[in-house]
Image (spheres, grey):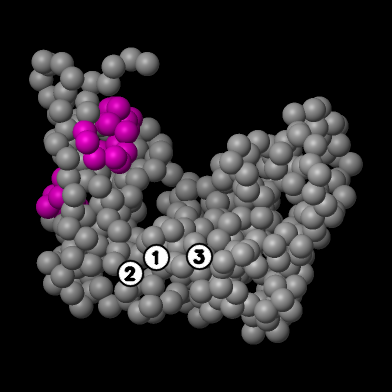
Amino acid sequence: MPARTYNCDVDAEPLHRYQPGGYHPLALGDFLKNGRYKILHKLGWGSYSTTWAARDQKRGRYVAVKITISELGESGELKILRALSALSRHDPGWSHVNQMLDHFTLVGPNGSHDCLVLELVGPNVADVVEAHCQNNRLPAKLAKLFAKQVLQGLDFLAANDIGHGDVHTRNLALVAPNLDDLGERDFIAKLGKPETGVVTRSDVQPFGYNVPTQIVRPAFFRRDILLSCPSVKIIDFGEAFFSDNAPSTLHTPLPVRAPEIVFGDRLDRRVDLWSAGCLIFELVTGQPPFDVVMMTPSILIEQMIELTDDELPSRWQAKWQPMQNDTPQRDENYTLHKWLEEVYFDNGKQAEFTKEEIARIAELTTRMLKFEPCLRAAPSEILAEDWLR
């Protein structure tokens, strides 16, 4: 591998992406949009953006500012969020979908960047479970509540012909209540004091003007957020699409990827139904139903066939035949119900759901995990069931 030009001890976004077309260099205390947004902390980063906690000086509230890489141009996410911001707030699912509050363009040394000002939310569910939850899974009461809220959010999106395309526990974030009542010092304490690292060059050349002098480690909220107001929002609409303009593929994480994505079939918003079924399984057990260390598309499809006990559509058979050569033979004979029961009632883990409830969860999840998208239960159908009502 070529030697890296820039280095930093803080593990965060890759420094080589601070180049024309890439990330915008930002520092704590910077102001954006003519002084309106003051940068206070970093919330996270991804392949196409960095996200920061900021104070909206005009409205007196804390927000998240997502700054896309400049080569992205006007993002599809912005179009989706614009559409969402114009919809009625009366639907119960509206409050479980992260909303855009403002947007603007930022011109910097690496190009022109879309800036999306979003509702500030807390940590994602996956991080909360890993850091704070006994047995590496949510308490039963929260698992059930979050499952209902996710389905309400997806029902709201579906009713407005929007597919999210990337439903999983890292795109499900806890609501952080009452933050706007805090002063800046207390707000920063809530996220944890920023940890920064100095960026250095590995040669003697001058420091680039398009690279930050420090990198900030992403914040992580204190544990009390989990108990203060248990509510979640669906976040990150980077893969989202309108029903009349579905993409040819999606980058949903492999363990929760719908089979039509794997087989390169025509996509629509019902990919979210499959991923939501996997997500509910994970909210209850702490792991997705299809989960191995060295997951491959062929192993994934083999697990899907085994656990769902569903018939692979004939139009996918031609692609499936050669894939089977890469799939190890499995001795187990599991159904989704049996697998859910085994994972949930694992030795040494406290069980809060009864066997009858686990059977009900398995039944509802199975209705969403159908190979044929048209046969998958819609969120509204699952929400009508007694277990969630």
- Label 2 sits on a secondary structure element that is loop
Q: Residue at x 71, y 39 (%)?
A: 299
Magenta region: which residues? 8-33
Q: Tell me residue 191's x, y (percent).
A: 24, 62
From the viewer's perspective, tell me whether residue 111 is left or right of residue 338: left
Q: Residue at x 44, y 67 (%)?
A: 133
Q: Bin the neighbour count of mark 1 within 10 Å (Cα to Cα): few under 14, some 14-19, many 20 and up.
A: some
Amino acid beneath label 1: His
Residue 82, by quadrant, is bottom left
Q: Are marks 1 and 2 in contact (CB under 8 Å)?
A: yes
Q: Earlier in the sequence, mark 2 or mark 3?
A: 3
Location of mark 2 (residue):
223
From the viewer's perspective, tell me whether residue 227 is left or right of residue 152: left
From the viewer's perspective, tell me whether residue 256 is left or right of residue 320: left
Seen from the viewer's position, the closer of residues 88 and 216 is 216
Q: Residue at x 27, y 31 (%)?
A: 15
Q: Bin the neighbour count of mark 3 within 10 Å (Cα to Cα): few under 14, some 14-19, many 20 and up.
A: some
| Res 86 seen here | no
Q: Is residue 342 magenta?
A: no
Location of mark 3 (residue):
135
Mark 2 or mark 3, which is nearer to you? 3
Return the mark for residue 132. 1
Q: Bin the neighbour count of mark 2 within 10 Å (Cα to Cα): few under 14, some 14-19, many 20 and up.
A: some
Q: Tell me residue 119's x, y (percent).
A: 35, 65
Q: Tell me residue 151's x, y (percent).
A: 60, 70
Q: Earlier in the sequence, mark 1 or mark 2?
A: 1
